[in-house]
C-alpha cells in the first residue's frame, strides 16, 4: 500500500475530506488480498460515493472501490428475481430489468447508488409505507468477511444475524459481493401520478395519509413559509400506470405517446465545477420555494416518466456543488407522531434556515436490522449548507426533539451526530456491536464514521 | 471532525495558556469534546486546567503531558504521548511568551531564548504533529500567531520576529499538507488582555481570550484558514503593511 496512492476522499456532501489509500481491485482475488494486507487503519468499501457524510471515507486507511463488481449475473423473468453484483449502479439495473416488464422493489431518491451501498444503508423509497426498505426484498447476499471468506447470508436461515447486521451496517461487517433481489412486475414503464398542492402542514399530512392508497407517496414542504402558510407543500402519490392509462382516451400527459420512457435517462443539465459562494441563501431559497409552490398544480392521474417521479434531482449533475465549497449536510430523521414532526419543522422555520425543500414521507414497519433506520411514523429530510450559522446547535436541538419522541436519525446521511445519542436512536446497538465483535474482532472494517461515532 | 466543524479529540500545546484554554472552552460548547490533551510545563497549572476542562466538558477524558518548549529532544515523546489514546482532530499550538524588548536589546541570550520558545518549539512540535496528521489522514493545526508578526515595531521586534517566522511557517505548512487532508488555521490576534500582557497599556482593538476562542470555533465551522481577532484588524494591518518604513516608524505604536 504505497503512500503515493493516497488521495483526498469526500462524499456527496463534500464536507470533511480526509486522505486515504484508494484502491480499485479488478477482480475478487485482489479484493480478497486486501483483507489480509497489513492495514493499520482498516478498510471500507465505497460504491458511487453518494452517501452524504463520512460513511465511505477512511482517513489514513484503505478505501476499496467496488466498481469491478459490475455484473448482472442472472435474471429470472418468470420468477421476477435478479442476481446482481454489489458494484452495479441502481440506474443501470433499473434499465436492464425494465425491458422485461420489471422494476426495482425499492428505489431511493437517486439512482446513482450501487446495490452494495443500497444494502449497507438499507435504503428506502417513496413506497416504504407499503413495501418496506430494500432489506425486505433481498433473499440472499454474499459477503466478503474480515477473515477473507465469502459467506452466503439469508434473512431467515443460516447466519441471519449477520444478514440483518449487514443491512444498514454501513459496510462495517464486510463487502457485499452480490445480492439476490426480488423484483416488482409492472404493467407499464409509466407512473400515474396525483399531485396535491396543500396550503398548510395539516393539509400536507392529510394528503400524505390519503396517498397511502397509492404505492408511492411523498411531500415536499416549504420550511421558510410562515404564518398561515407554515408547512405548505406539494404532495405527490403514484402507482405504476396500467396499459389503459397510457393508451386510453382522456388526455394523456405530454410525451406519453411513442416509446416507453427510459428509467435511466442521461442528466439534462450540469452545475459547473465552479459556483459563486452563497448562491443558496435565505432569500434565493425562499424565492425558489415560493415560485415552485405556486407553479405546482393539483391534478390526478397524470402520466409521468419514472425518472421524473423518482429522481428529479438526478436530472441535474452535480447539484451538490450549489452549496459552495463548504458543502452540505443532509439531516434525515423519523418520528412516530405528527406533533414531533410539526415541532421539527417549526424549529427549522424559526431558525430561518435556508432549507431548499424539505422532504416528508410516511414510513411503515421497520425490519430486524439493528442499524436499519426506518420505523413507523413520519420521516423528514432536509439539506442545509454546512456553513449555515448555528447549524450544529440547530441540528443538536432537533436530535433532542427526535430522541424525546422516540425517533431516530439516519446514519447513511449523518456527518455530525453526538456519539452518546447513538444507543438512543438505535436501541439494538449492543446487539449489533456484539455481532460485529464476533465477525470482525480486529476491526478490519473501519470508516471515518465508525471512528467518529465509536461504532 | 464531522461536517459541521465541531471536533471531538483535541490537544493544547501550551496547556496553561489563557488563550489556548479559552479556545478549548469555546470548543467544549458544542458538547462534542471526548478527549482533551493538555501539554505544558507547570504541573500545578496543568492540574488546574484539567479540572476546568473536566467541569466545562462534563465527561471528556483529560490527559496531561509534560512539555518543555525549549527541550526539543523530548518532543518526539511528547507528541507520541499526545496521540496515545487515538486520533486528534485539532491540535492548538499556543505555547509562547511576550519577552521584553529592552532586556533583549542588551541581553541577546534573552532574545535567543524567546525565539526558541515561540518559534523553534512550534516548528519542532508542529512538524511532528503534521506527520501524525498525515498518517491519520486528517487533522487541523491551529497556530496562534500575532499581528505583531506583520511589521517590525520598536517596542516588540523580537517577539514580532518570532511570530513572523511562525506565521510564514504555518501558512506554508498548510499549503504543503492541503492534499493530505490536513488543515492549518492561522490565528492573528491583536492585543489580548491576559496574564501575559498584564500591566501594559491597552491599545484600541484589544480583545479577550474568550474572543479568540469564539473566533477559532467559528473558523473551524466555516472552514476559514486565517482568523484576525478582532476581524477589523485585517483591514488595519493591510493598511499598515502598505505604509513606508519611515512613516510607520513615526506611528505611536
Image (cartoon, coloured by chain):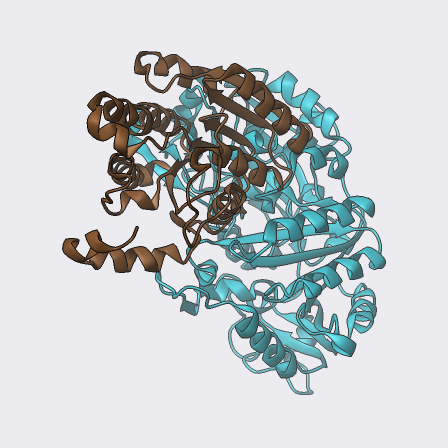
Q: Pinpoint residue A189: horizontal percent, then vertical percent.
A: 60, 66
- When the figure is inspected, residue A399 is found, relative to residue A216, above or below; the finding is above
Question: Residue A282 versus residue A253: which sits nearer the camera?
Answer: A282
Q: Quadrant of the N terminus of chain A?
A: top left
Q: Pinpoint residue A203: horizontal percent, then vertical percent.
A: 81, 73
* Chain painted in cyan in the figure: A
Q: In the figure, residue A98 lies in which quadrant?
A: bottom right
Q: Quadrant of the C terminus of chain A?
A: top right
Q: Residue at x 56, y 63 (%)?
A: A311
Q: Residue at x 70, y 57 (%)?
A: A380
Question: Residue A163 versus residue A51: which sits nearer the camera?
Answer: A51
Q: In the figure, residue A220 lies in which quadrant?
A: bottom right
Give the side of residue A19 with respect to residue A410, left or right. left
Question: Residue B96 versus residue A163: which sits nearer the camera?
Answer: B96
Query: Could you tell me if residue A455 is visible in this image?
Result: no
Question: Residue A318 versus residue B120: which sits nearer the camera?
Answer: B120
Give the side of residue A32 with respect to residue A340, left or right. left
* Chain painted in brown in the figure: B
Q: Pinpoint residue A37: horizontal percent, then vertical percent.
A: 40, 18
- When the figure is inspected, residue A226 is found, relative to residue A3, above or below; the finding is below
Give the side of residue B45 with respect to residue A79, left or right. left
Query: Could you tell me if residue B241 is visible in this image?
Result: yes
Q: Pinpoint residue A319: horizontal percent, then vertical percent.
A: 47, 62
Amino acid at each position: 500500500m504505497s503512500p503515493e496512492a493516497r488521495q483526498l476522499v469526500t462524499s456527496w456532501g463534500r464536507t470533511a475530506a480526509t486522505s486515504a489509500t484508494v484502491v480499485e481491485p479488478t477482480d475478487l482475488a485482489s479484493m480478497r488480498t486486501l483483507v489480509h494486507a497489513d492495514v493499520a487503519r482498516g478498510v471500507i468499501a465505497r460504491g458511487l460515493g453518494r452517501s452524504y457524510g463520512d460513511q465511505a471515507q477512511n482517513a489514513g486507511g484503505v478505501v476499496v472501490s467496488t466498481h469491478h463488481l459490475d455484473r448482472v449475473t442472472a435474471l429470472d423473468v418468470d420468477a421476477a428475481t435478479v442476481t446482481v453484483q454489489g458494484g452495479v449502479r441502481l440506474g443501470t439495473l433499473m434499465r436492464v430489468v425494465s425491458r422485461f416488464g420489471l422494476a426495482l422493489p425499492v428505489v431511493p431518491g437517486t439512482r446513482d447508488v450501487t446495490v452494495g451501498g443500497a444494502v449497507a444503508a438499507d435504503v428506502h423509497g417513496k413506497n416504504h409505507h407499503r413495501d418496506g426498505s430494500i432489506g425486505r426484498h433481498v433473499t440472499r447476499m454474499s459477503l466478503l468477511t474480515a477473515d477473507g471468506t465469502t459467506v452466503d447470508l439469508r434473512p431467515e436461515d443460516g447466519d441471519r444475524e449477520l444478514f440483518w447486521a449487514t443491512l444498514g451496517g454501513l459496510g462495517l461487517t464486510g463487502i457485499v459481493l452480490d445480492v439476490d433481489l426480488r423484483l416488482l412486475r409492472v404493467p407499464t414503464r409509466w407512473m400515474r401520478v396525483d399531485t396535491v398542492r396543500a396550503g398548510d402542514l395539516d393539509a400536507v399530512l392529510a394528503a400524505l395519509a390519503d396517498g397511502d392508497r397509492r404505492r408511492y407517496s411523498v411531500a415536499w414542504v416549504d420550511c421558510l413559509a410562515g404564518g398561515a402558510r407554515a408547512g405548505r407543500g406539494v404532495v405527490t402519490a403514484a402507482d405504476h400506470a396500467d396499459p389503459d392509462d397510457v393508451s386510453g382516451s382522456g388526455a394523456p400527459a405530454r410525451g406519453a405517446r411513442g416509446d416507453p420512457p427510459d428509467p435511466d435517462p442521461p442528466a439534462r443539465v450540469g452545475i459547473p465545477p465552479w459556483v459563486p459562494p452563497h448562491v443558496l441563501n435565505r432569500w434565493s431559497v425562499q424565492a425558489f420555494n415560493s415560485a415552485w409552490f405556486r407553479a405546482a398544480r393539483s391534478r390526478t392521474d397524470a402520466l409521468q416518466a419514472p425518472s421524473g417521479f423518482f429522481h428529479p434531482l438526478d436530472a441535474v449533475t452535480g447539484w451538490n456543488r450549489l452549496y459552495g465549497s463548504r458543502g452540505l449536510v443532509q439531516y434525515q430523521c423519523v418520528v412516530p407522531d405528527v406533533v414531533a414532526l410539526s415541532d421539527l419543522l417549526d424549529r427549522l422555520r424559526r431558525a430561518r434556515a435556508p432549507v431548499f425543500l424539505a422532504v416528508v414521507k410516511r414510513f411503515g414497519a421497520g425490519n430486524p436490522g439493528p442499524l436499519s433506520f426506518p420505523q413507523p411514523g413520519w420521516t423528514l429530510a432536509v439539506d442545509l449548507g454546512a456553513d449555515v450559522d448555528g447549524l450544529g446547535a440547530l441540528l443538536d436541538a432537533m436530535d433532542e426533539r427526535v430522541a424525546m419522541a422516540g425517533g431516530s436519525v439516519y446514519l447513511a446521511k449523518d456527518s455530525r451526530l453526538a456519539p452518546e445519542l447513538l444507543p438512543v436512536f438505535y436501541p439494538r446497538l449492543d446487539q449489533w456491536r456484539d455481532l460485529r465483535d464476533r465477525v470482525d474482532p480486529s476491526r478490519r472494517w473501519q470508516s471515518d464514521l465508525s471512528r467518529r461515532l465509536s461504532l | 471532525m464531522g461536517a459541521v466543524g465541531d471536533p471531538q479529540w483535541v490537544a493544547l500545546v501550551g496547556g496553561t495558556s489563557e488563550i489556548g484554554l479559552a479556545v478549548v472552552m469555546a470548543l467544549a460548547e458544542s458538547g462534542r469534546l471526548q478527549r482533551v490533551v493538555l501539554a505544558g510545563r507547570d504541573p500545578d497549572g496543568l492540574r488546574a486546567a484539567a479540572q476546568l476542562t473536566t467541569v466545562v466538558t462534563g465527561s471528556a477524558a483529560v490527559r496531561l503531558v509534560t512539555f518543555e518548549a525549549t527541550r526539543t529532544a523530548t518532543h518526539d515523546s511528547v507528541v507520541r504521548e499526545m496521540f496515545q489514546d487515538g486520533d486528534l482532530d485539532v491540535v492548538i499550538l499556543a505555547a509562547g511568551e511576550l519577552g521584553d524588548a529592552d532586556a533583549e536589546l542588551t541581553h541577546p541570550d534573552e532574545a535567543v531564548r524567546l525565539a526558541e520558545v515561540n518559534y523553534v518549539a512550534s516548528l519542532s512540535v508542529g512538524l511532528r504533529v503534521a506527520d501524525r496528521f498525515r498518517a491519520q489522514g486528517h487533522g487541523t493545526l491551529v497556530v496562534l500567531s500575532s499581528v505583531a508578526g506583520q511589521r517590525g515595531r520598536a517596542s516588540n521586534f523580537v517577539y514580532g520576529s518570532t511570530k513572523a517566522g511562525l506565521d510564514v511557517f504555518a501558512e506554508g505548512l498548510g499549503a504543503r499538507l492541503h492534499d493530505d487532508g490536513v488543515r492549518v488555521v492561522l490565528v492573528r490576534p491583536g492585543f489580548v488582555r491576559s496574564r501575559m500582557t498584564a500591566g501594559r497599556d491597552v491599545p484600541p482593538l484589544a480583545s479577550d481570550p474568550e474572543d479568540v476562542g469564539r473566533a477559532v470555533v467559528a473558523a473551524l465551522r466555516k472552514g476559514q484558514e486565517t482568523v484576525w481577532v478582532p476581524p477589523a484588524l485585517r483591514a488595519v494591518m493591510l493598511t499598515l503593511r502598505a505604509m513606508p518604513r519611515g512613516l510607520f516608524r513615526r506611528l505611536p505604536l
